[in-house]
Image (spheres, grey):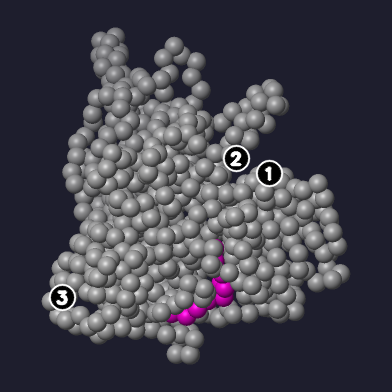
Amino acid sequence: MRFLSILTACVLTLLPSLVSAQISTVEVVRLSVDGRYDQPLDLESRRPSLSWQIVQTADCAEAVCPGDRQTAYEVQVATSEHDLKTAKLRWGPGKQQGSIQSLRLDRELNSHDTLFWRVRVWDALNQPSAWSNTSSWSVGLLHQSDWGEARWIDYPDRSPNQPPPLFTRQFNVPDGKDIVHARLYLSGMGMHLASVNGKAVTDEVLAPGYSNYQLSSEYRTYDIKRLLRTGANAIGVKLGSGPTYVRRSITNPALGRNAPYAWWQSQLKGDGTLSEAAAIGSISVRLNNATGYHVQGSINIDTSGGGDNLESRVITAINTVQRIVSFSPALKLAHAGGARVTGSGNNIAASDPSAGAAVTPRLIGRLEITYDDGSKDIIVTDRSWCTALGPLLTDAWYSGSDYDARREVDDWDHPGSQQESSNWIPAGIVPPPNLATKLVARAAEPVKVLEYLEPVSVSTPFYGTWVFDLSQNIAGYPIIKLPQMTAGIIIKMVAAKSLNPNGTVNQESLGIGDRGTDVFNTYTTSGRTGGETWYLDFNYFAMQWIQVTGLLEGFSPRAGLITGARVQADVPIAGTFRSSNSRLNRLHRMSRYSIASNVISVFTDCPGREKLSYPADYTMPMSAIYHNVHINAFLRTNMRNLVEAQSIANTSMAGNVGLKAPVYDWGYTGRFGDEVN
């Protein structure tokens, strides 16, 4: 009996420790860094916010369920997954009492830092959960100097009416080395699309998106390790005009684009020549025309000839009568009379016309490859890149695109492609959008194709005209899949939100008229064996109906000819709604699609007519927005745009946020940013 008593006492003594060793039925999920759940590669915060959520993984019938609340937590951060598992931590304060599920890292990070982290919690019954799945994030290029010798490049002396350019760069990965990291940092204006060895580096679209590009240009960071191979490799970049060069003068009469629609136009800046030579040490120059320049904007001297002698300076004074522009610092080179000179405004300068200064396509990039022996290969944009005019004949942010597939060059972005042909020339050095422009990482989620819609019906209002109904109004673009056809057939696609009584598409909601009438896309077939597929790289529209003309006589539409691609910032779903009332369900569905169509690179007022970010238009329905989608990260980008959009004019409007942020066309004079239009 004495033995049994001792045994019973031992068991009772062990029970508390056995209970405390049990794993909770609470699970830690949805780890996020500065509101991002997708493990970003270029976080700009040096002390980011780390957050998590908890879920109950088993049914509970007790008065107190484990998932009712969190009583304590532990966060561990390390520089590798191995270090995290072996408790070799960069940061790990241990178990902390409390219910908070978000905290800020208590130490500053540096450019290129990559961190791995995990969380566990103690539940309402004080039982510990298992560790969460490991998540990670990387810090981007925090300082402009991190870009090293990278320069902005373009197609030298390109006319705005010429096709947007392609760029490529060949390079080698040495044998006998294993790649640890390979990161491509890239910013292309107005928009870029990058590939490595012929394969897309991302599923993001419409990058880099809107910004106050006279102050900041968003860059992207791509992990391209999986795309590289030992030996020869190649980077390819396509550029589009996007919202940084919007002009109704970009016509294409051969394809019927005579009056391009644009809600607004980018402001043209100074573009002329030196009236006389400028010596080394000069702090002013005389121009043939001094209009289009702004104090605190930039003057770019000797921009022709590939930019070998380019010097950009900050404008300090302008004498329009004598056509003299003064600047700082002094010139380091001599420049001959007749040298080309351009200007770029500052989008928060005192003069409204400086908002939305026109910037032609250009890019800046840096590739960093780190090997297992600690060595690195660095490739930057410079004159060693090759450029050519691409098959995208016309690219207009509002009016649409004209693409001639006959101009495509197979394998142009593959290693070993023949850039020595006459169509390819060395890239030219070009000034940044403005000397004040900084390269910044995007805090918000990227824009992606989140849904593909097949037409529910096809009508033929007239012979040779087909109208495809997607059954849902979206922000997106059409994808056309053609069987094999003769080369040179021009197919026209017109997107719209409504129909005319005769069944054709109606675009009157765009406000066409004085702002132009042409809003369409054309595709000219190449005659490729097996058929061809095309979609827009650098544009999107408001659409439910897509009208197609130009197909050969006798051709009948078939399933899959047209598909609608719906684009949206890839923000996580925050909440859903369902009721027994079908009308309420339909109203909520309509609201969700309305929100989705205006959460793109920025909040917009509409996806067709203006595509601009009016603060009043998104602050009014903000409650509906954040109940439907998580916008923590999105708002970080939005706040930077608002700060940059504040006027610094020495007037009563100083500090006012423009009617739009980012600012593109106008936005200060006599108006306030919270005005409901």
Q: Nearer the viewer, residue 413 or 189?
A: 189
Q: Residue furthest top?
A: 1
Quarter residue 534 falls in = bottom right
- SS under mark 2: helix
| Labels 1 and 3: the sequence-earlier one | 3
Residue at x 47% of width, y 80% of height: 388
The answer to whether marks 2 and 1 mark residues whose Cβ atoms lie closer than 8 Å is yes
Residue 670 horizontal side relative to residue 375, left or right:
right
Residue 323 falls inside the magenta stretch: no
User: What predominant SS class does the magenta segment belong to?
Assistant: strand
Query: Height in image: 435 above or below 405?
Result: above
Residue at x 30% of width, y 45% of height: 647
- SS under mark 3: loop
Q: Which mark is residue 472?
A: 1
Circle 3: residue type: Ser
Q: Residues within 10 Å of mark 3 (few under 14, many from 20)?
A: some
The percent coordinates of residue 121 (x first, y second) are 33, 30
Circle 1: residue type: Gln
Residue located beneath label 2 in the image:
593
Query: Height in image: 304 above or below 209?
Result: below
Q: Nearer the viewer, residue 79 or 490?
A: 490
- As measured in the structure, the alpha-carbon distance from the residue carrying label 2 to the one carrying label 1 is 8 Å
| Labels 3 and 2: the sequence-earlier one | 3
Residue 578 horizontal side relative to residue 645, left or right:
right
Residue at x 37% of width, y 44% of height: 668
Q: Which mark is residue 414?
A: none
Q: Is residue 3 visible?
A: no
Circle 2: residue type: Tyr
Q: Which mark is residue 282?
A: 3
